[in-house]
Amino acid sequence: MFLSLPVLTVLIPLVSLAGLFYSASVEENFPQGCTSTTSLCFYSLLLPITIPVYVFFHLWTWMGIKLFRHN
């Protein structure tokens, strides 16, 4: 399997960071212009926050299933 969990764990933050650097270099008013949901800058800042939260709750659910199954 090419896209295993360790590969995705490294690849997704790197792609997010590349998008953040790209939008920082393209946008003229980078920190202030990120408030509109139509701009690419907004999503490049949202992605690095969303992915760790998703991974945390996914692992939390997995741990809940494991504990429920073994108790």
Image: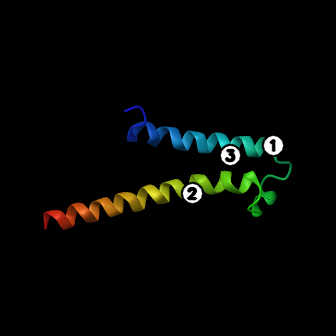
Q: Report x, y in % for residue 70.
A: 14, 63
Q: Which mark is residue 20?
A: 3
Residue 54 as seen in the image, left or right of residue 21: left
Disc 3 secondary structure class: helix
Indicate which disc, 1 or 3, sits on the residue closer to the N terminus. 3
Tag 3: amino acid: Leu
Which residue is under mark 2?
A: 49
From this viewpoint, which residue is outermost toward the front?
Answer: 1
Tag 2: amino acid: Ile
Q: For the residue carrying disc 3, how many other residues have a C-alpha within 10 Å: few (<14), some (14-19), or many (20+)?
A: many
Indicate which disc, 1 or 2, sits on the residue closer to the N terminus. 1
Q: Report x, y in % for residue 56.
A: 42, 59
Tag 1: amino acid: Val
| Quarter of the image with the C terminus in it | bottom left
Number of marks present in the image shown: 3
**What residue is rendered at 84% in x and 53% in y?**
29
Residue 13 as seen in the image, left or right of residue 19: left
**What residue is rendered at 39% in x and 41% in y?**
5
CA distance separating discs 1 and 3: 10 Å
Which residue is under mark 1?
A: 26
Q: Is residue 20 above or below residue 32?
A: above
Residue 7 is drawn in which quadrant?
Answer: top left
| Quarter of the image with the N terminus in it | top left
Disc 2 secondary structure class: helix
Circles 1 and 2: CB distance less than 8 Å?
Answer: no
